[in-house]
Amino acid sequence: MAPQSIGLTAFGGYIPRLRLQRKAIAQANAWVAPNFLGKGKGERSMANWDEDAVTMAVEAARDLLGPDDDRSHVDALFFGSTTMPFKDRLNAGIISAALTLDETVRAVDVASTQRAGTSALLQALTTVKAGEAKNALVVAADHRKTRAASAQELDFGDGAAAVSVGTENVIAKYLGGTSLTVDFVDHFRGDSEEFDYNWEERWIRDEGYTKIVPRAVKAALANAGVKAEDIKHLVLPTTFGTKFVETLAKKSGIAPEAARDTLAANCGETGAAHSLVMLVHTLQKDAKPGDKILVLHFGGGCDALVFEVTDKLASQSGKRGIVGSLADRQEETNYLKFLTFNGLIELEKGMRAEQDKKTALTTLYRNEDMLMGLVGGRCTETGVIQFPRSRISVNPNKHTVDTQEPYKFAERKAKILSWSADFLSFSMNPPHHYGMVVFDEGGRIMMDFTDVEQGAVDSGMEVRLVFRIKDFDDKRGFRKYFWKAVPVAGANAKTKIGQAAE
């Protein structure tokens, strides 16, 4: 009996909508770093103030899983990142709760290396191959802080990608790979530090990439039984540019034209997520059945994985993925907003922001499905849907008791019933937009809006729901998450600026 094929079965991606123009960064810092003016081209992805590695990972996973809210088939979850919001709390557990995965899921955090994304993928492949999981979900995301007027501020970006691993309906068969562990320190971030400390670029390029990557390529190709000239697509994240990747490809016997675009011009390098971001982009844009893809990620050595695309790839044609995320963009030229959103300058928040934001962990636990998964209730007798779920139905004609079953709202279609743009309450991105959201199948929730500009909201607009940071408890280092509504662009005519504002 032939062995089962193991590989990728689906993909998803998420790049934040905001795109900070590099020209704005270069011009703002020209007084201290005039050499950056020549690098002020293109744009980098910029997370909103209420986004982090966890929320972006959730969005990438939702893109992969699609609108079906039955996620019982996912039995393993691997989360790779170097910017997890909690040092001692299972970050993958937060993602699992937001996705409403079963509590029997094996959830694992993979951190402390730029290879976290590919290392998580290797763990998933090993787990499925061993038969300990049938459908493993791999998510990778990074949201890194950078010093103002640094090269990293221009080169980096924020983003996430997700792939699932299994043995059925494989879109890219795993042929083999390798993982080299070399304590080559190109950069590091100490336990008490917010920013990376970077070593000299020429050393990293000449002694790191140029010598370590070819060794990983050679070993991976040998393990996969594939010749270098058979590689159609070469994925290698680097801030040195696509031309450098072409040079490394040629040195390894791979055709230079196989080097994939590093997405530097319109996204930036998304850290531990970038190899998967580039892989998803490749699968969406140019990969064809029979193509062999070599995925590499450098950092503390090098991971290398070889895949062969199958004819099942067509099943993913409707995904938003990285291609769709890159197309859904909003230019941002306010450099001070970028600094504020990333906590790099201290903003005066005023007295209205002075409140204790301590989270009652007992309440969070008891209401986890409601707060993290946006799970309400549906009456099994009358069919009435409500949020939150309660013992007594809100049906005015029949107040049934203990008849409600869990009902998931996150993937349901909804519209804005009423809204407000409030300048009185504190908001990191004023005005504070919020309102009543009604769902097509029933139920309504008062929610915050996000990813919206003043004047771009109106009653009747379609919205999609996203998992975001609700509040920061800076005193205790805790983050409170909840769901918010994002008005769908083009769903309705824009209102005049200031209409219905308080």
Image: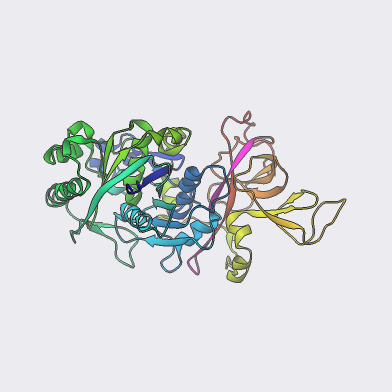
Query: Is 435 drawn above or below residue 311 in the view shown?
Result: below
Q: Closest to the observer: 497 or 180?
A: 180
Q: What residue is rendered at 59% in x and 55% in y?
A: 373
Image quarter hosting the C terminus: top right
Q: Is residue 416 left or right of residue 260?
A: right
Q: Closest to the observer: 99 or 240?
A: 99
On the image, the x and y values in percent for residue 267 come to 36, 39
Magenta region: which residues?
A: 461-480
On the image, the x and y values in percent for residue 451 come to 53, 42
Coloration of the structure image = rainbow
Say whether residue 467 is magenta.
Answer: yes
Say whether residue 40 is magenta.
Answer: no
Query: Is 315 drawn above or below residue 199 in the view shown?
Result: above
Q: Is residue 297 visible?
A: no
Query: Is 212 drawn above or below residue 362 in the view shown?
Result: above
On the image, the x and y values in percent for residue 223 come to 20, 49
Q: Closest to the observer: 470 or 279?
A: 279
Q: Closest to the observer: 489 or 232?
A: 232
Q: Is residue 476 visible?
A: yes
Quarter location, residue 168: top left
Residue reaching furthest bottom?
Answer: 362
Q: What residue is rendered at 35% in x and 55% in y?
A: 129
- Dominant SS of magenta comes to strand
Q: What residue is rendered at 36% in x and 53% in y?
A: 144
Q: Is residue 103 left or right of residue 203?
A: right
Q: How many marks?
A: 0
Residue reaching furthest front?
Answer: 1
On the image, the x and y values in percent for residue 365 come to 59, 67
